Amino acid sequence: MTSVGKNQLTYKGHPLYYFGSDAAKGETKGVSYPRPGVWPILTLNTPPLN
């Protein structure tokens, strides 16, 4: 899968991480959006995206 023209690591079709405000490799500003502690967790039971 690709995101903004670059390869994107996915699990069952879900992107594992992406956030438009990250400017450099390794930044993870999205983990505190929309507020700290809110971030989707993917597990073995996560249904695939269609």
Image (spheres, rainbow, N blue to C red):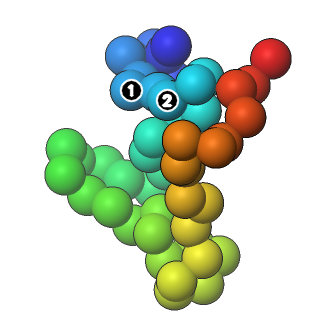
Spot the residue most to the front. Answer: 45
Q: Amino acid at mark 2?
A: Tyr
Q: Residue at x 55, y 58 (%)?
A: 41
Q: Are marks 1 and 2 in contact (CB under 8 Å)?
A: yes
Q: Is residue 41 above or below residue 43?
A: below
Spot the residue most to the right. Answer: 50
| Residue 25, quarter of the rendered image | top left
Q: Is residue 1 left or right of residue 7?
A: right
Q: Which mark is residue 34?
A: none
Q: Amino acid at mark 1?
A: Leu
Alpha-carbon span between mark 1 and mark 2: 7 Å
Residue 46 appears in the picture as rendered: yes
- Neighbor class of circle 2 (other Cα within 10 Å; few <14, some 14-19, many 20+) is some
- Neighbor class of circle 1 (other Cα within 10 Å; few <14, some 14-19, many 20+) is some
- Which percent across, then down, holds residue 39? 56, 67
Q: Residue at x 19, y 52 (%)?
A: 26
Q: Residue at x 59, y 33 (%)?
A: 14
Q: Is residue 44 above or below residue 12?
A: below
Q: Is residue 49 left or right of residue 41?
A: right
- Which percent across, then down, holds residue 24? 22, 47
Residue 18 appears in the picture as rendered: no
- Which percent across, then down, holds residue 40? 60, 60
Tag 1's secondary structure? loop
Q: Is residue 50 left or right of residue 27?
A: right
Q: Mark 1 sits on what residue?
A: 9
- Which percent across, then down, holds residue 49? 74, 25
- Nearest to the observer: residue 15 or residue 25: 15
Q: Residue at x 54, y 41 (%)?
A: 44
- Nearest to the observer: residue 48 or residue 3: 48
Tag 2's secondary structure? strand
Query: Which label sits in the foreground, 1 or 2?
Result: 2
Q: Mark 2 sits on what residue?
A: 11
